[in-house]
Amino acid sequence: MQYKIMYQPSYSLLELQLDPSESVVAESDAMVSMTSNVRMDTGAKGGLFGALKRSVGGESMFQNTFTTQDGPGSVTFAPTMVGDIAARDMRGESLFVQSGSFLASSPTIELDTKWGGARTFFSREGLFVLKATGVGMFFMSSYGAIHAVTLAPGEQLVMDTGHMVAFDATMGYHVRPVGGLKQTLFSGEGLVVDLTGPGTIYMQTRNFGAFVNYLVPKLPFKRD
């Protein structure tokens, strides 16, 4: 599989060149185009229970698998949001991905949900994160550009939860209010996550929740 990410960072497009009989798994409605020799199959990967777990985590219940026939082929994918795409060459490690950021992957990558318990109970991004594990290519998307930061063992970083895309499972994390009641209610920051290395964090430069909060008061509404 060869890949190219174009038009970064605002309107990114992922192009995959697939070898004969090679497959790629993608989120529902992510496909932009494909060559005529690519077959698309739709299914609930991991069975009905696995699909239900992913849907609770913010992903579609069903995923599409694209397979080339009679020679090589190509497929292009784009995220729903106006944003970026990042590639990760997985070599057996695990990556926690916020709901909605999975775009596509090699079929050898296993996707599951991880219950965050009390650590993520108040997170604006939801109670679940996807856990991606395996060997192969993994492609994630964002709202805004993706900025990667690598932390050394013991090094710490505090992030707004609305800017999180993904982070290595080797990292420690804890979601908490940004400060006291006054800061949490009026600072506009809300919740943050304390991340501890080693590992890499993928953050998005825009916060969709903040954009919605900005937009809603400006929308026209029908008066009685």
Image (cartoon, helix red, strand yellow):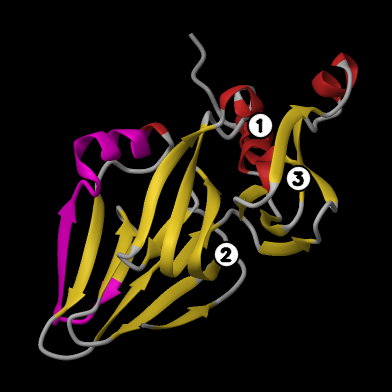
Q: For the residues labelled 1 and 3, say whether their Cβ atoms are less than 8 Å apart.
A: no
Query: Would you say 177 lies left or right of 62 here?
Result: right
Work out whether mark 1 precedes mark 3 in sequence or the reverse, and give the earlier one: 3
Quarter of the rendering occupied by the N terminus: bottom left
State the SS at label 3: strand
Judged by depth in the image, the label closer to the viewer, 1 or 3, is 3
The answer for how far apart the CA atoms under marks 1 and 3 are is 26 Å
Q: Residue at x 89, y 18 (%)?
A: 180
Query: Would you say 211 lies left or right of 45 here?
Result: right
The total of numbered circles placed on residues is: 3
Question: Looking at numbered disc 1 in the image, what kind of residue is underneath it?
Answer: Asn
In the rendered view, would you say 211 is above or below 222? below
The answer for how far apart the CA atoms under marks 2 and 1 are is 22 Å
State the SS at label 1: helix
**Segment tinted magenta in the rendering:** 33-55
In the rendered view, would you say 128 is above or below 131? above
Work out whether mark 2 precedes mark 1 in sequence or the reverse, and give the earlier one: 2
Judged by depth in the image, the label closer to the viewer, 3 or 2, is 3
Question: Looking at numbered disc 2 in the image, what kind of residue is underneath it?
Answer: Asp
Question: Looking at numbered disc 3 in the image, what kind of residue is underneath it?
Answer: Leu
Depth order, front residue of 199/78: 199
Q: Residue at x 24, y 46 (%)?
A: 46
Judged by depth in the image, the label closer to the viewer, 2 or 1, is 2
Q: For the residues labelled 3 and 2, say whether their Cβ atoms are less than 8 Å apart.
A: no
The residue at the far top in this view is 224
**Label ID, residue 213:** 1
Q: Quadrant of residue 38?
A: bottom left
